[in-house]
Image (spheres, rainbow, N blue to C red):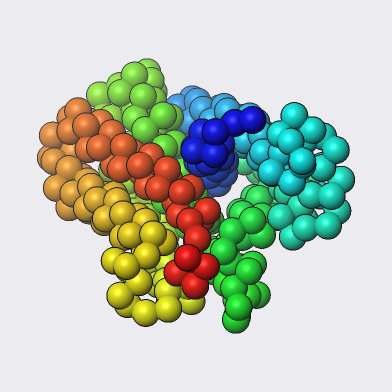
Amino acid sequence: MLDPFVAEAAQGVVRALLFAGLIGMVGSALFAWRIAPVFPGDARRAAGVGAERLMRWAGVLASLAIAARLVQQSAAFADTASEWKTAVPIVLGSTTWGKGWILQALALPVALLAAPRGMRHAGIARLALGMALLALCAAPAFSGHAVGAPRLAPLAVAFDTAHVMAAGAWLGTLTALAAVAIPIARGHPAIAGHPGEVMIAALSRFSPIALASAAILALTGAFAAWLHLEALSALWRSDYGLMLVRKLVLLAGTGAAGAYNWKVVTPRIAAGGDLRALVRTVTVELLFAAALVSVTALLVATPLPAES
């Protein structure tokens, strides 16, 4: 039998990988829809291909994490961890967690099948991709605190879904900027001589996405804190509150790095076209984002103050 600490750590890692996969899928789709079109000529096609590649890798990550989550949850239900297979029907058929898992398992292949066309063209494929991504982001609410809220549970699920979607829109699109847009701007022949101009156009489309996403994250996060914390003192007197404080600190760090990019680095690019400062600051922002996702994965499994 696994040591409880090891099992809990493994569950946290898998949840973090799942969140990372979902964020990457949402961000790659939004990048293809909103930011890739600013690239000229063949560079636009390269940006689209890069976004599709990121979608596939994020989908693989999410697939592995979803499968691992079923094994972990079934092992927790079984008499012994080695008998996890016997608990799968119970987990899937008799628990809210199972319904959320089934939703993700059905939505993921739809998203991956619709992505190649849905990321390039409007129409039914794009609608299918958008709806599948929405379903993927809704599923975590059925395995966390939202669905079990003693009051306003439907609203809690809706806000939790919006929270995950907003994280994907901000951090996932930022990942696509780092992994796709910056390398193309720095090295594609179609952009030779004016990488700064193209990146300014890309960043001008990303900034409203980041600002709107940050506002949604703040609103939905404040609602969750109000719903789950019994009192303000629970922020420093409960494990859940302390974990939430850690998340808020990391969120503030991520936002500060983004604000620095917006207010300081972007004008420098406009003035000189040098992208090296952008690479450094985006890297810092992504490191904050990785830590933020990790803490969020722990937060959703931390007992609420009322349960402690």
Q: Residue at x 26, y 55 (%)?
A: 249
When asked about the image quadrant of residue 245, the answer is bottom left
Q: Position of residue 28 (x, y in %)?
A: 53, 40
Q: Residue at x 42, y 43 (%)?
A: 294
Q: Position of residue 286 (x, y in %)?
A: 33, 38
Residue 202 seen from this side: no
Q: Residue at x 40, y 48 (%)?
A: 295
Q: Is residue 136 above or below residue 174?
A: below
Instruction: Looking at the picture, tell me which residue is in the foreground, 131 or 298.
Output: 298
Q: Quadrant of the N terminus?
A: top right
Q: Is residue 46 above or below residue 170?
A: above
Q: Position of residue 3 (x, y in %)?
A: 54, 33
Left or right side of 116 for 187: left
Left or right side of 83 for 228: left
When asked about the image quadrant of residue 185, the answer is top left
Q: Position of residue 109 (x, y in %)?
A: 75, 38
When asked about the image quadrant of residue 119, the answer is top right
